[in-house]
Amino acid sequence: MGFFATKVLPEFIEVDLGHKPLQIRLKRNSRAKRYILRIPPGDPTPVITVPARGNLKTAQDFANRQVEWLKQRLGSRPNTIKFEEGARIPIKGVLHTLRSSGKLRGLAKVDLEEETDEPLLLLPGETQSFHRKTKDFLRKSAKEALEAHVQHFTKKLGRNYHSITLRDTKSRWGSCSYDGKLSFSWRLVMAPPDILEYVAAHEVAHLVKLDHSPEFWRVCEQLAPHTKQAQRWLKEHGSQLHLYGQE
């Protein structure tokens, strides 16, 4: 039994969808009790979670049995939205249209269309650089908002944090390490502001209790009284944030 627990798995296996092979990522999880297939939000590559005692043959057999499910799910997935001219993306919960500012240099900025008051994100430079510049703008905006909330919450609790890092994680919105390093998804800036505020409060609360005990939730709700509403919003709408900016 120990052999299966320690045997190294390949990163990917393939299944035949009839018209082309599909790669599936394998991810071992020592706490998993069964094989689980999922399609991460905003990621075209399905993932199979393999339990500690799982093995390659059983993972492949499991994947082969899921071919029809994969065809159905992949065929019905919502379209992704690229960061390109004319695209509409949420910024702090409000849809903005991406437009060229007509300038070669300068900073991206939020503005209103003169005739219709439509929210815009104006981007300088060539349209080929829209993806990078939009992402840079969103990351910068997310960092500023998160730093402000984290500083406010840590001061309120009398705690210190080590650093704030932005990532593009698909399985979690934030994390807190034992040494006070906080990590967040930059995509939170696309959600309504109170959602980002809740995630900041959640991770700062881990500076007090690095678990999800009743004491942790008491601290979290002290910082963010709208905790339950924010959790519900993320459960219902969070996956949509991963549809934006996929190349």
Image: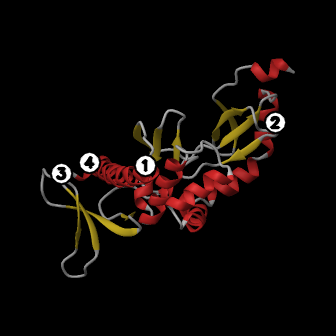
Q: Are there few (<14), some (14-19), or many (20+) residues within 10 Å of tag 2? A: few
The mark nearer the N terminus, 2 or 4, is 2
Q: Mark 2 points at which residue?
A: 61
Which label lies toward us, 2 or 1? 1
Sooner in the amino-acid sequence: mark 2 or mark 1: 2
- At horizontal 76% and vertical 36% (from top left) the residue drawn is 31
Task: Name the amino acid, label 2.
Answer: Asp
- Residue to which mark 3 is pinned: 125
Helix, strand or loop status at disc 2: helix
Q: How far apart are marks 3 and 1 (CA)?
A: 39 Å
**Label 4 Cα crowd, 10 Å radius (few <14 / some 14-19 / many 20+):** few
101, 173: nearer the viewer: 173
Residue carrying label 4 = 129
Q: Which residue is drawn at 32% across and 50% down?
A: 131
- Residue sitting at x 29%, y 72%: 119
Does any portion of residue 78 appear in the rendered image? no
What color scheme is it?
Answer: secondary structure
Q: Mark 1 points at which residue?
A: 154
Picture quarter with the N terminus: top right
Query: In front of the other: label 3 or label 1?
Result: 1
Q: How far apart are marks 1 and 4 (CA)?
A: 37 Å
C-alpha distance separating marks 2 and 4 = 43 Å
Judged by depth in the image, the label closer to the viewer, 2 or 3, is 3
Q: Can residue 83 be seen in this view?
A: yes
Tag 4 and tag 3, C-beta contact below 8 Å? yes
Q: Quadrant of residue 85?
A: bottom left
What is the secondary structure assignment of the residue under circle 1? Answer: helix
Whole-percent x, y for residue 218 in the image? 61, 57
Which residue type does callout 4 highlight? Answer: Ser
| x then y, percent, for residue 84 | 32, 57
